[in-house]
Amino acid sequence: MVTQQLESRDISDQRVLQAMRQVPRHLFVPEDRQNEAYQDRPLSIGYGQTISQPYIVGYMTAALALSGDEKVLEVGTGSGYQAAVLSRVASQVITIEYIPELADTARTALAKLGYDNVEVLVGDGSAGWPEEAPYEAIMFTAAAPEIPAPLRDQLADGGRLVGPIGSRYDQVLVRLWRISNEWKTETLKAVIFVPLVGEHGWRNY
């Protein structure tokens, strides 16, 4: 997976590549889909949600430019796989899931693997988690109409935010850098994600 789907494209961050070699992706998908876990595509995990394509997981992780000391906020836990990868390249990961059943499954999978620097919370991730702010890096893994204002506000000075924005069927991945009270936004690539549900995302599926 890493050699054929990540290294052969544009992902060269060695810490990210090593993290994706270490994390057993098949343990984050339904048992009847485990034989498909390492294919180059997203997979359904139930409740209308997906585990992202391995390349996109690697690409978004690399886009955060993590050094290993950061506290990272992830919005949209899903299966827990992205949080697991982040946990190998950051010091602390706080991840928020809107659907309680998915949060429970992710929490169990992460605990079984001993990834004890990840905290899984249930709530409206579009509002972030101000109790632990600021964050050196923020990732949202479901598409919003625009970058949710609370996530911008919870980003530390010098921090990076990565996530998809746009309509439900036409989205781009963006990266936001915060320098003091100024923000620099970059457009990275076209993507398709499930909608981010919440007060600062979409109101319903």
Image (cartoon, rainbow, N blue to C red):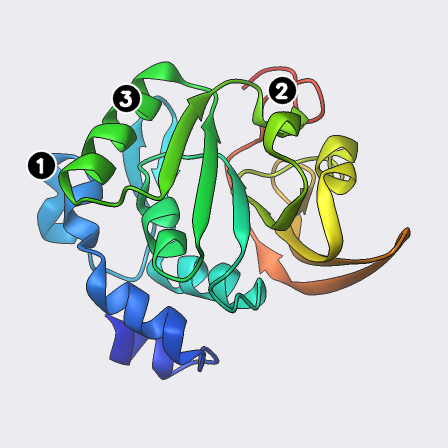
Residue linked to disc 1: 32
Q: Residue at x 47, y 37 (%)?
A: 94
Of labels 3 and 1, the one closer to you: 3
The reply to whether discs 1 and 2 touch (Cβ–Cβ < 8 Å) is: no
Q: Residue at x 9, y 36 (%)?
A: 31
Residue linked to disc 2: 198
- Label 3 to label 1, Cα distance in Å? 19 Å
Rendered-image quadrant of the C terminus = top right
Q: Amino acid at mark 1?
A: Asp
Q: Which of the 4 image quarters holds residue 102?
A: top left
- Label 1 to label 2, Cα distance in Å? 30 Å
Residue 47 % position (x, y): 35, 21
Q: Amino acid at mark 2?
A: Gly
Residue 117 as seen in the image, left or right of residue 132: left
Which of the two labelled residues, at mark 3 and mark 1, occupies the earlier sequence position?
1
Q: 158 or 33: nearer the eye?
A: 158
Residue 76 as seen in the image, left or right of residue 19: right
Q: Is residue 190 above or below residue 163?
A: below
The reply to whether discs 3 and 1 touch (Cβ–Cβ < 8 Å) is: no
Q: Amino acid at mark 3?
A: Asp
Residue 62 % position (x, y): 50, 68
Residue linked to disc 3: 104
Q: Residue at x 31, y 46 (%)?
A: 81
Which of the two labelled residues, at mark 2 and mark 3, occupies the earlier sequence position?
3
- Label 2 to label 3, Cα distance in Å? 19 Å
Number of the label disc, if any, that sits on residue 99: none
Secondary element at image label 1: helix
Q: Which of the 4 image quarters holds residue 133?
A: top right
Residue 142 as seen in the image, left or right of residue 28: right
